[in-house]
Amino acid sequence: MSNSRPRPPSDTPPKAVIHRLSLYLRELQHLIRDGSETTSSTQLGRLLGLTDAQVRKDLAHFGQFGYPGIGYRCGELVQEIKCILGTNQAWPVAIVGMGHLGQALVGYRGFEQQGFQVTVAFDIDPDKTGRTMHGVEVHHLSAIERVAREQSIRLAILAVPAAAAQEVAEVIIAAGIEGVLNFAPVTLTLPETVHRVGVDLAMELEQLSFAVVNRTQKS
Amino acid sequence: MSNSRPRPPSDTPPKAVIHRLSLYLRELQHLIRDGSETTSSTQLGRLLGLTDAQVRKDLAHFGQFGYPGIGYRCGELVQEIKCILGTNQAWPVAIVGMGHLGQALVGYRGFEQQGFQVTVAFDIDPDKTGRTMHGVEVHHLSAIERVAREQSIRLAILAVPAAAAQEVAEVIIAAGIEGVLNFAPVTLTLPETVHRVGVDLAMELEQLSFAVVNRTQKS
DNA sequence: TAGATTGTTAATCGATTAACAATC
DNA sequence: TAGATTGTTAATCGATTAACAATC
């Protein structure tokens, strides 16, 4: 019997690499829109403020996508990155919490373009449930298990008040949601099988105020 | 005459440290709300999924705030971190672009609590300008230079369509804005004296879909 | 061919962790 | 005193950069 360490092979790339992969994807899509057929690690790096070496190293985590002497074919690399990120196929997404932010997110056009489709929303306020907002039905939170199953929803956007976030997160996890994009300014305590990304709007402004008062160089 | 390197002393702490500082602040505020007088690097680390050594090291970049054998006094540390981040005083903030997202952000309560006050908004749509939304006046973008000066606004939240983002960013920079929180899915090309934080909602979901399809461990 | 650019290895750099004397 | 916890130094770890043979 061999060594039983969890998963030593095909090492997981650092999170920062995955984040840059998204940036590469976004930039490649702009390049294509502007008519470029190919690009290079140098160009991509310059556009994003990174070194050419870093661009190549990041991509090397996942395979060989370039052509020596040529560079990368934009359309091809877009497809490769989408496969890596899992967005080569569309993901249905639920929005939980239909306050101002939840309502704005239902109407946000930027998700669809990147392979995410907000197909349903949830709230507990009877003034909101049963209605349709931006063409999306708002159900009572108690229906999430059934609806998530019926629609094969694995990802949810949590846009509820901070005080409710932990409790609601537990409900949606129990309903089978595997990944949560959390806008509430709290650290969620959840099983580590559940994936979390947190966006705290006030924290983002704090990063900015720090930079401004400290006149940090070279953002 | 002394050496003229830009700013070698009091080295700028890494961005990741500043980000964690915001997390410490948020967690300390929760602890205080729950009645804690003091905490420790071990407790703070456990709550945030960090090692105790990292918490102490991060704080050590800025001074000595703890008491050996005791830990940290929550209220005191909150004040220290606010000073470091620059949020010990309130920042007036402008929102530029009053689409769904901009409107939601004007009504967001989480900013005020952390020392940011949305005092004014801008758009170019005559159906929106001249009105008041969530108690905030919406001016035409052309008024930004005057208004930003009058209200001493240094930070702005950019919530315009991707296609307009670069152009509008240049306008607000010309009006004297020093820091931009950008929600448009584009990399802004601006003088490096201007500070930027980008939040791309679709990118955040991509991080999640990657994690889910790759069953990444230990988020 | 000369010029451009990749993928990859080795070198550098920086960040995290471990350990511990000092302190309460 | 014994137990807890800091701030800090040294050790470890990982990520970025530089360099270059291979390729087109």
Image (tube, coloured by chain):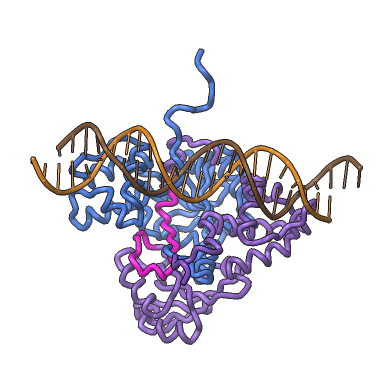
Chain colours: A purple, B blue, C brown, D orange
Pinpoint residue B84: horizontal percent, then vertical percent.
36, 39
Magenta span contains residue B105: no
Task: Specify the quadrant of the image occupied by residue B132.
Answer: bottom left
Pinpoint residue A193: horizontal percent, then vertical percent.
41, 70
Q: Do we see residue B205 in this rendering? A: yes
Residue C20, placed above or below residue A155: above
Q: Do we see residue A207 in this rendering? A: no
- The front one of C13 and A47 is C13
Magenta span: A184-206
Pinpoint residue B139: horizontal percent, then vertical percent.
51, 52
Pinpoint residue D24: horizontal percent, then vertical percent.
83, 56
**Residue at 39 percent of width and 78 percent of height:** A128
Magenta span contains residue A198: yes
Residue A128, placed above or below residue B85: below
Query: In the image, is B178 to the left or to the right of A77?
Result: left
Instruction: Name the residue furthest top.
Output: B1
**Residue at 42 percent of width and 63 percent of height:** B218
Query: In the image, is B211 to the left or to the right of B59?
Result: right
- The front one of B75 and D7 is D7
Q: Quadrant of the C terminus of chain B?
A: bottom left
**Residue at 39 percent of width and 44 percent of height:** B91
